[in-house]
Image (cartoon, grey):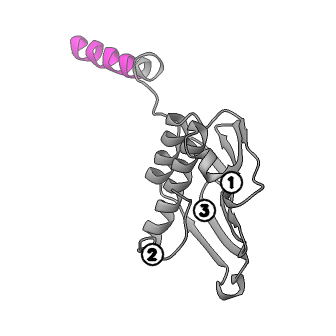
Amino acid sequence: MIRMLVGFALATSSQAHAGRFGAVAPARADRLRFSISLTEGEHSRDSNSTLTSFTFDGAKLKYDRTYSGYRASKRPAEHREIDLAGDEIRRLTELIRAKTLLASRNLRYPIEGGGRYCELTISIDLNRRKALVRISGLLDRLAGENLYTASRAFVQEVEAILENHDGHGNGDRPGLAR
């Protein structure tokens, strides 16, 4: 009887201390918020531009796209809102870390003259660590820049998540220039 009580006391004592000393607490979920503003356009005789914005508040992703310039009235504005799943948020968080987007940086080239251009702003808040990425320039000039490539990968992942929720591919929708 005494041996059984001592065994019970040791087991209870070791269980109580395991939570404090031996067991690893479950990883806390990352808190992610971001906004993306992307303007793509062309300086030519038929100048036009597309403004795409994404806002994620921690649960809901909001998407808006508007058009201006030549034939803009023939293309209706788009608006969608979706709830992101935990695995989608994890994928975005991992991409932010892998592409080192949690550091504020600027990349600016002139956008005057003819050709296709891009103006991209990404604001990220990950676990209260904030970053602001600003990029602008002609696409020919930006194509080889690491910051542009990393930012483009993040925007494309957000677009892919939105398309997966919609249940269709890109189709005729213009996306971030490749």
- Quadrant of residue 131 within the rendered picture: top right
Q: Residue at x 48, y 45 (%)?
A: 90
Residue bearing mark 1? 35
Write the residue at 53% across / 57% down.
Answer: 158
Q: Give the left or right position of residue 91, taking residue 123 as reference.
A: left
Q: Amino acid at mark 1?
A: Ser
Closer to the N terminus: mark 2 or mark 3? 3
28, 176: nearer the viewer = 176
Cα separation between marks 1 and 3: 9 Å
Residue, disc 2: 171
Q: Residue at x 22, y 11 (%)?
A: 3
Choose top left, top right, bottom left or bottom right for residue 53. bottom right
Distance from the alpha carbon under mark 1 to that under mark 2 = 24 Å
Query: In the rendered image, which quarter is residue 13 located in?
Result: top left
Question: Compared with residue 170, is residue 176 higher up or lower down, i.e. above or below?
Answer: above
Task: Indicate the position of residue 140 as horizontal and vertical percent values.
Answer: 60, 50
Residue 61 marker: 3
Horizontal side of residue 140 vs 137, given as left or right: left
Image location (x, y in percent) of residue 134: 72, 44
Location of residue 132 with respect to 113 vertically, above or below = above
Chain part drawn in magenta: 1-15
Q: Is residue 11 magenta?
A: yes
Q: Which circle, 2 or 3, is nearer the viewer?
A: 2
Residue 91 x, y percent position in the rendering? 46, 47
Residue type at mark 3: give it: Leu
